[in-house]
């Protein structure tokens, strides 16, 4: 990194939305750093980040908006020019109408200023998007939308164009990741102090390109004063909680996961889940099956044990075994009265449970079981299952996951391209780095198994759910093509192994995070 850029290991910090970012800035000002000083640091860092590229023949085009995001733009232009780079500046509003820190930043720029028109983005190989940041509060108006579309068109026509978004691509809602009308498709985003939810949530996630978060002089302890509850799902959240096997470890120290097996016609899902639970480190894994399906389980599973139960009473007896630390029900289970009966037995037990797939559909139609949910129950719905389970909950994906956790008292894993984990005590984590190859049959069963296998090992529901989601994605990312669900348990286990081989190597290689370099 260039001298003067202090990168933040953003995956290790909470995510701050628009309101909290504003509060943080005001706290910093109360501590004696003025808004203009913060803006000067922010602009200088972005300018230096850009100068890591070769100096272009055409001027860098800096697009400045009406607020403080635009203010950053004026500083970036000034800094680049001071470093001898050719620069053009175009403003969305007459510069005389700028106020406060943005007006002060504009006063530092001594070069010419263009008015933004749809033609402005022509002939630039590096564009700086300083139109709107966390202050975006409505859909882009036609003037802003046309320049944004012009930038995206230029990038589509000239794929080598670099588009640097300041703080967040203009048009992306920093809190929700929603696109407000249209939005810049950035190749790079440079944000400040912390990442924002909109950097990780789709569809905005697709617009951000490579994300760097830089330090602008705000004391990190001020972030804690905001008591943030939203995080990027990364090993920083849960890595130290996963137990490691030592030379004197005993399998019983790593828990016993019981997987409720599907009937003879649908055994694949629970077998995938069982293998995943074992691979990810559960000490023992058993599948409970009816006698009629035993030959299938017994002939296809070796290290996973099988237990026969042909009646509700026999299942109850198995569930009452105190050595069982967690139970998974749902994959391949069938939406049947038998599944409902077993689910009830599981929920009446005080211990840990993971409910997936058919168990969620059964739960959606069994209101009497809702009252039995508790914080040691993990529900793993995709959007369709979520809507059936919580039909009256509305809002953004984060809001809905948080409301569902609060309302149900259970830990929610709302699956999707940006899977969200939310707990009844108000913490949530967003997984923003899942590869699209996960959209294939059976991967959900593996995820349920991974969460179950980790949950078996004396970790909390939040840690197990977050770790399962992250290792699932990281395991998938190891495959460049041809991923099938059967590959995932082993790859997720390899990803887990890497966490412990060398945490620093892991931080550099497996996460888009960097240590501060100055
Ligand atoms: N504060 C600090 O100390 C630091 C802040 N920093 C930087 O400041 C950024 C936040 O600045 P900000 O709060 O001024 O908001 P910003 O994103 O520029 O937009 C607000 C302006 O846009 C307007 N507007 C909104 N939506 C619109 C639309 N759809 N179409 C048209 N107009 C629209 C809105 O108008 P209004 O709602 O008032 O009519 C207002 O004029 C932050 O992302 C970071 O880059 C850094 O320098 C670090 C220090
Ligand atoms: K921007």
Image (tube, rainbow, N blue to C red):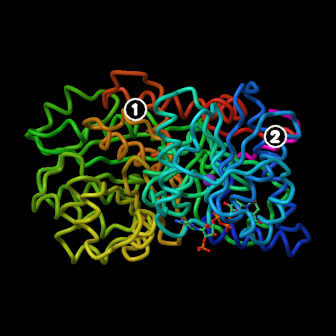
| Disc 1 target residue | 489
Residue 368 position (above or below residue 511): below
For the residue pair 77 and 381, the one nearer the viewer reads as 77
Pointer 2: what residue?
Answer: 80
What separation in Å lies between label 1 and label 2 (alpha carbons)? 49 Å
Task: Answer left or right for 485 relative to 218.
Answer: left
Report the side of 273 relative to 160 (left or right). left
Please identify the dominant SS of the magenta region: loop
**What span is in magenta?**
1-9
Residue 223 point in image, percent of width and height: 74, 65
Q: Does the magenta-highlighted stretch encompass residue 201?
A: no
Crowd around label 1: few <14 · some 14–19 · many ≥20 (10 Å) = many
- Name the quadrant of the C terminus: top right
* Secondary element at image label 2: helix
Disc nearest the viewer among 1 and 2: 2
**Residue at image point 56% right, 39% down:** 209
Task: Name the image quarter holding residue 101.
Answer: bottom right
């Amino acid at each position: 990194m260039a001298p003067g850029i202090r990168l933040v290991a953003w995956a290790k910090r909470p995510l701050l939305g628009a309101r909290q970012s504003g509060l943080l800035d005001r706290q910093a000002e109360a501590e004696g750093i003025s808004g203009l000083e913060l803006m000067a640091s922010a602009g200088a860092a972005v300018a230096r980040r850009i100068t890591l590229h070769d100096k272009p023949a055409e001027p860098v085009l800096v697009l400045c908006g009406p607020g403080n995001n635009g203010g950053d733009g004026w500083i970036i232009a000034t800094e680049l020019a001071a470093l001898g780079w050719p620069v053009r500046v175009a403003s969305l509003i007459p510069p005389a109408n700028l106020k406060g820190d943005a007006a002060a930043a504009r006063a530092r720029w001594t070069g010419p200023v263009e008015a933004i028109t749809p033609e402005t983005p022509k002939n630039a190989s590096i564009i700086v998007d300083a139109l709107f940041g966390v202050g975006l509060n409505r859909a882009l108006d036609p003037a802003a939308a046309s320049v944004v579309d012009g930038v995206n068109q230029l990038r589509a026509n000239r794929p080598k164009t670099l588009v640097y978004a300041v703080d967040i691509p203009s048009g992306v809602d920093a809190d929700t990741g929603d696109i407000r009308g249209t939005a810049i498709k950035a190749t790079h985003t440079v944000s400040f102090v912390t990442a924002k939810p909109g950097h990780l949530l789709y569809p905005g996630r697709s617009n951000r390109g490579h994300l760097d978060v830089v330090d602008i002089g705000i004391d990190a302890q001020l972030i804690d004063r905001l008591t943030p509850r939203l995080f990027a799902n990364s090993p920083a959240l849960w890595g130290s909680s996963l137990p490691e096997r030592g030379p004197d470890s005993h399998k019983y120290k790593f828990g016993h996961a019981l997987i409720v097996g599907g009937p003879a016609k649908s055994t694949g899902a629970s077998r995938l889940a069982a293998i995943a639970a074992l691979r990810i480190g559960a000490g023992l894994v058993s599948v409970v099956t009816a006698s009629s399906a035993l030959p299938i389980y017994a002939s296809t599973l070796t290290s996973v044990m099988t237990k026969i139960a042909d009646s509700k009473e026999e299942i109850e007896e198995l569930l009452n075994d105190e050595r069982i630390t967690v139970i998974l029900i749902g994959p391949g289970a069938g939406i049947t009265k038998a599944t409902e009966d077993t689910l009830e037995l599981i929920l009446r037990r005080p211990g840990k449970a993971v409910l997936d797939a058919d168990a969620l559909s059964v739960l959606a139609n069994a209101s009497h079981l809702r009252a039995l949910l508790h914080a040691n129950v993990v529900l793993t719905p995709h959007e369709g299952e979520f809507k059936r389970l919580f039909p009256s909950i509305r809002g953004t994906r984060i809001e809905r996951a948080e409301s569902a956790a609060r309302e149900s008292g259970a830990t929610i894993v709302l699956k999707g391209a940006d899977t969200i984990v939310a707990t009844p005590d108000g913490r949530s984590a967003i997984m923003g780095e899942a590869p699209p190859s996960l959209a294939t049959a059976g991967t959900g069963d593996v995820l349920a198994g991974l969460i179950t296998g980790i949950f078996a090992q004396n970790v909390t529901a939040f840690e197990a759910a977050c770790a399962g989601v992250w290792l699932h994605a990281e395991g998938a990312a190891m495959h460049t093509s041809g991923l099938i669900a059967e590959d995932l348990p082993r790859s997720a286990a390899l990803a887990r192994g890497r966490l412990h081989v060398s945490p620093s190597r892991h931080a550099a290689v497996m996460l888009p995070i960097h240590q501060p370099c100055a």
